[in-house]
Image: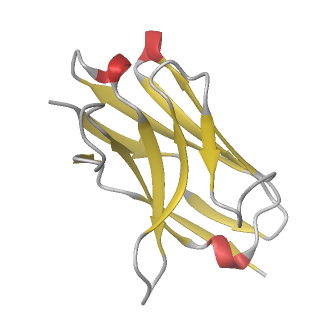
Amino acid sequence: QVQLVESGGGLLQAGGSLRLTCAASGRAFSTYPMGWFRQAPGKEREFVAAVSWRGSTTYATNSVEGRFTISRDNAKSTIYLQMNKLVPEDTAVYYCAARNPTVTTYDYWGQGTQVTVSS
């Protein structure tokens, strides 16, 4: 079992930066691939970025590539999403999620943190 709590969301102007944090509990955290997802009003939840259990491999969706960086610190049981050059289209509730490495779906989710970017 993994419990996840996101923080760091807020309201800011376009062009700004924000770092989201996801604190995890559970002994299996360091073995789980982790990801960030987001859901904008009226839209389906979408994948943003993912990081391997060791942190050596990362992935990001095209719309955030080059602006967002995912990372993790297994010693602190924490993952991060550094978001730069934010645009209004990044406005959404951001969720972190954990995936048991034996399956392909994300089974553990945080409660989400709101990010609002004004133009």
How far across and down, in percent of the image, does residue 9 sit? 54, 55
Relative to 91, 24 lies left or right: left
The quadrant in which residue 58 appears is top right
The image quadrant of residue 19 is top right
84 to 43, vertically: above or below: above
Front residue of 71/11: it is 71
Side (left or right) of 39 relative to 115: left
Viewer-side residue, 103 vs 91: 103
Q: Position of residue 107 (x, y in %)?
A: 22, 47
Q: Residue at x 25, y 19 (%)?
A: 28
Question: Could you tell whether 44 is left or right of 60 in the image?
Answer: left
Residue lying farthest top? 75
Residue 29: image x %, image y %?
Answer: 31, 22
Q: Residue at x 61, y 22 (%)?
A: 56
x%, y% of residue 64? 71, 60
Q: Establish if 74 lies above or below 109.
A: above
Q: In the image, what residue occupies the spot 29% across and 54% down?
A: 111
